Image (spheres, grey):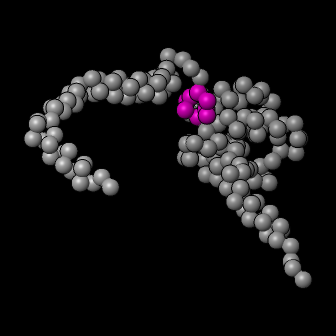
C-alpha cells in the first residue's frame, strides 16, 4: 500500500515559507490584558525601529533594548497616553531615527533624496562616459590582393 506524499509536501512547503513569516518577539509577560490596548501597543511597536537591529521593528526584535521599548510603550499606554503622545515621547528620547518611516522635513530631506541623487549621478556618469569614448574606427576597404585571396578561400570552401 502506497503512503500519501501530500503531507510531506505540505510540510516541506510550510518549512520553506516559514522564514518569510514575521516573527513576533513580544513575550507573554509583556502582553496587556486589554485586547484593544494591546492592539494599540502592537501598532505603535510596529512603527518603531529597533536601535540594535536597525531594520526591524521593536515588535519583531529580540534585542534587550527592543524589549525595554516595548515595555515602555505599554507603560505609557496604561498611564493613559494617546498613541501620538507615546510616539512623541519615544522620538523625543531617541530622535527621528527610531521611526521606521521618518517624517519628510528639512533635517531628513537628504535621507529621502539620497537614492534619487545616486541614481541621477550614475546616469550622468554613464552618459558622459559614453560620449567620451572614441567612435570605433571604420574598416578600410580590402585591397585587390586581399579580395583575390578572399575569393580563393571562398571558392575552395564551396561544394
The magenta stretch spans which residues? 95-102
Position of 60 relative to 139 (above/below): below
Tell me if residue 126 can be seen. yes
89 vs 94, left or right, is right
**Residue 143 image offset from top left, x and y in percent:** 11, 36
Residue drawn 68% across and 51% down? 20
143 vs 102, left or right, is left
Quarter location, residue 56: top right
Magenta residues: mostly which secondary structure? Answer: loop
Quarter location, residue 72: top right
Seen as rendered, the residue at the extreme top is 106
**Residue 123 image offset from top left, x and y in percent:** 38, 25
Tell me if residue 67 can be seen. no
Seen as rendered, the residue at the extreme bottom is 1
**Residue 115 image offset from top left, x and y in percent:** 47, 28
16 vs 159, left or right, is right
Position of 106 relative to 140 (above/below): above
Residue drawn 88% across and 41% down? 35
Q: Name the quarter where the C terminus is drawn.
A: bottom left
> Within the magenta stretch, is there residue 46?
no
84 vs 156, left or right, is right
Position of 17 relative to 75 (above/below): below
Amino acid at each position: 500500500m502506497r503512503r500519501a506524499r501530500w503531507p510531506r509536501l505540505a510540510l516541506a512547503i510550510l518549512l520553506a515559507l516559514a522564514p518569510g513569516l514575521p516573527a513576533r518577539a513580544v513575550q507573554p509577560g509583556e502582553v496587556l490584558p486589554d485586547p484593544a490596548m494591546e492592539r494599540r501597543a502592537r501598532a505603535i511597536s510596529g512603527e518603531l525601529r529597533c536601535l540594535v537591529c536597525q531594520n526591524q521593528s521593536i515588535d519583531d526584535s529580540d534585542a534587550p533594548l527592543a524589549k525595554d521599548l516595548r515595555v515602555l510603550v505599554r507603560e505609557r499606554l496604561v498611564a493613559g497616553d494617546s498613541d501620538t503622545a507615546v510616539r512623541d515621547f519615544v522620538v523625543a528620547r531617541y530622535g527621528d531615527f527610531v521611526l521606521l518611516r521618518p517624517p519628510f522635513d528639512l533635517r531628513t530631506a537628504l535621507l529621502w533624496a539620497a537614492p534619487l541623487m545616486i541614481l541621477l549621478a550614475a546616469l550622468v556618469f554613464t552618459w558622459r562616459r559614453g560620449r567620451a569614448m572614441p567612435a570605433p574606427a571604420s574598416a578600410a576597404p580590402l585591397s585587390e590582393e586581399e579580395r583575390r585571396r578572399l575569393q580563393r578561400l571562398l571558392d575552395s570552401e564551396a561544394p
